[in-house]
Amino acid sequence: MTRERTVQLVLHYDGAEFAGWQRQPAQRTVQGVLEDALARLCRGPVPALGAGRTDAGVHARGQAVGIRVPVKWEGASLRRALNALLPRDVWVAAAHDMRSEFHARYDATARRYSYYVGTDDLAYSPFRRRWEWPVHHSLDRARLDEAAAAIRGEHRFLAFAVRGTAPPTDQHRCTIQHAEWRDRPGGLVFEIEANRFLHHMVRFLVGTMIDIAAGQRPPDSLSVLLAAADNQNTSPPAPANALCLDAVRYPRHLYLTAE
């Protein structure tokens, strides 16, 4: 029997030319190109399990991926070999040796995302709008801060998820550990970290918060929606291209090498 080692890959990718993370027939996906590269190196199929399934157009600079490869593939050499094979819009930033029981999805204790909003005229430049959402409305900064504060802590986010994407028994409860809007040159960035996220959750939240700050929704909309039984009155989700998965957190005892 071939001995194997368990490795966590940390991926950066530009999601613009991908139909999301998950492998799909006849479509280019991040999982697909990664598994193709792994198969070439390991001379056979190597499943790559991501910490989350980013949607089409969503970017990452901290997607965690669990793989099992022949023991000869030490982390540093595996990283170099993969980066020599992967396309230019995917890059392995790190490779950590993990305990054999490591599971990229179920062992994650938190995930962190950022969403970029452009508020100046240059946000419409093709060099920026690939990674930002240009918003031409005047935004009330204080309302954005109030909206971010309203979602911190544990809540039921049924109004901020795509219907039918979670099991019927799921209560849609998430604990938001960090939520903050920050000013940056040319616009704003929304940072959020939670123990779990629902499908389209960050994009629904951002779309609703921007509508509140633009005066298109009442200031108490988020509190009302957190008590709602469906997503019928939620604002449309913000565009996917301005969302980035920044980091996935795991318990330290799962690492065999230093983080």
Image (cartoon, rainbow, N blue to C red):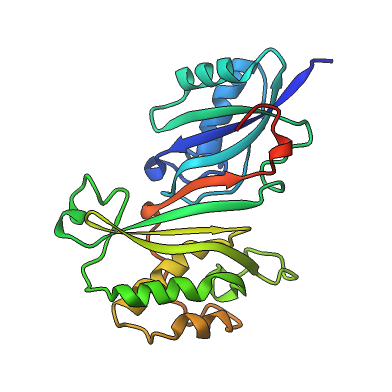
Q: Which residue is situated farthest in the top direction here? A: 72
At 50% across and 37% down in the image, what residue appears?
30
At 60% across and 74% down in the image, what residue appears?
158
Q: Is residue 228 above or below residue 81?
A: below
Frontmost residue, 108 versus 105: 108
Q: Is residue 244 above or below residue 136?
A: above
Q: Position of residue 209 (x, y in %)?
A: 39, 73
Split into 4 quadrants, where in the image is the C terminus?
A: top right
Label tally = 0
In which image quadrant can residue 6 be found?
A: top right
Q: Position of residue 225 (x, y in %)?
A: 52, 81
In this rendering, position of residue 185 left or right of residue 202: left
In this rendering, position of residue 13 left or right of residue 138: right
Q: Which residue is situated farthest in the right direction here? A: 1
In which image quadrant can residue 132 be found?
A: bottom left
Split into 4 quadrants, where in the image is the N terminus?
A: top right
At 39% across and 69% down in the image, what residue appears?
207
Q: Which residue is situated farthest in the left direction here? A: 121
Q: Is residue 168 above or below residue 255?
A: below
Q: Position of residue 150 (x, y in %)?
A: 50, 76
Q: Position of residue 153 (x, y in %)?
A: 59, 70
Frontmost residue, 36 versus 233: 233
At 59% across and 62% down in the image, what residue appears?
198
In which image quadrant can residue 220 be found?
A: bottom left
Frontmost residue, 122 versus 25: 122
